[in-house]
Image (tube, helix red, strand yellow):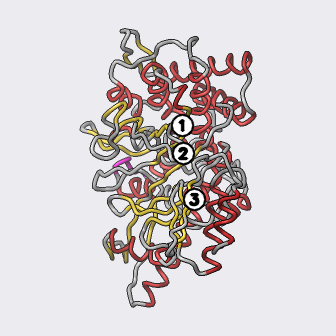
Amino acid sequence: MDRRIYGVETEYGITCTLKGQRRLTPDEVARYLFRSVVAWGRSSNVFLENGGRLYLDVGSHPEFATPECISIRQACIYEKAGELILHRLVERAESRMRDEGIRGTIYLFKNNTDSAGNSYGCHENFLTRRASETSDYEAQFIPFLVSRQLVAGAGKILMTSKGPVFCLSQRAEHIWEGVSSATTRSRPIINTRDEPHADSEVYRRLHVIVGDSNMSDHTNFLKLGTASIMLRMLEHGGTALRDLTLESPIRAIREISVDLSGRRPVRLASGREMSAFDIQSYLAEQATEFERTHGLPDEESEALRLWVETLDDIAHQSERLARRIDWAIKRDIITKYIDGNTLTLDSPQAQALDLQFHDIDPDRGIFNKLRNRGLVDSMFTAEETEAATGTAPLDTRAHLRGQFLRKAREAGRDVTVDWVHLKINDQAQRTVACKDPFRSSDERVDKLMESL
């Protein structure tokens, strides 16, 4: 596809404590959190004026889904804006709790596991053409995703039978299938539920659910950008790409996760062995050749440069890793702390650092403290992220949704929207279906708004 729609759905861990003790259940906290947005809609599934969606997922996990974005950069900025939106809901919820005499602090964590062993996801969405649907997922795309944790993992202290280890990915231990229509019962790497939120005769939505939630701009951009490059190569035919089918993707994803060097070999279906570093390096080399012969859009060229730089940083254990890549940033912080205080990875202090890294509070979260002090690199400005909290992208269908919601709220009218439909809840039940996610202007929507 010359143009592509991107979207990211991020679930958050939630808790409320007072003096170290749980104050409210996650369900009770979520009700306080969503009370202000329920006023905008009628449930805990609410679309916002920036075109995105707030949702309360299974297990009382708040989720922010970005609006439809037409670029990698745009998707990363809106994904980051979700943190600000949810933090402001936390501030309102705590204020409401105080008014009702309930003491406690609400914490939202942009991570993927909780202390009970549950996992919640960060799902990437890529619009693809149905006619050019690739059959090379198992041969190239799944090996890419399994090994991608080496450059895009969030990092985690993992308790094993042999003791604690620091691993690359939070999701690796919770993935059980390669490709499946399930999401929670048996989590796959790729979810195949056919729900394009667009003209189903033209498009499919590739739903990748294996990735970690990332705090770093560079890691987010790398995660989405490399996947976009891979899809472009596969859609072009992928004939030059070697068959990298893994003998067992699920075993491989776990083995790779506990090897920070990326050099541990995993077995391919052919009987050969390759490491995560080998797979990523080979695919980056092929992408470089593809760029030379066919060209890449500017953003994908930027992602390719970052991909090559990151692999070189891993090969040489460059200090730059600990400024750009989530797992390396976190490992650096934890290692320095436990070494300086004669602690171990399984100490409560190390476990707390692991969790606090993902606290989205701008002043309290460890990653955000590092950002505020200039100790990690950024790709996007605070102004860009702030603007994305209240304004939808101008160049996708999200613009229509944002305009419709804004005018409806100004007029005090009751409306219902989803990813495709805009509806006025009156006797006429006027509805417009916007099936083209690339279309940011529509006379039908203009007329609908005029009738508000």
Q: Secondary structure at mark 1?
A: strand
Q: Is residue 79 visible?
A: no
Q: Where is residue 151, by image quadrant?
A: top right
Specify the segment rendered in magenta.
Answer: 342-346
Q: Secondary structure at mark 2?
A: loop
2 vs 3, front mark = 3
- Image quarter hosting the N terminus: top right
Depth check, front residue: 259 or 202: 202
Q: Where is residue 304, by image quadrant?
A: top right
- Image quarter hosting the C terminus: bottom right
Disc 3 designates what residue?
432
Disc 1 designates what residue?
203
Residue drawn at point x = 38 percent, y = 51 percent? 120
Residue kind at label 1, given as amino acid type: Tyr
Disc 2 designates what residue?
198
How crowded pointer 1 is (Cα within 10 Å; few <14, some 14-19, many 20+) is rated as many
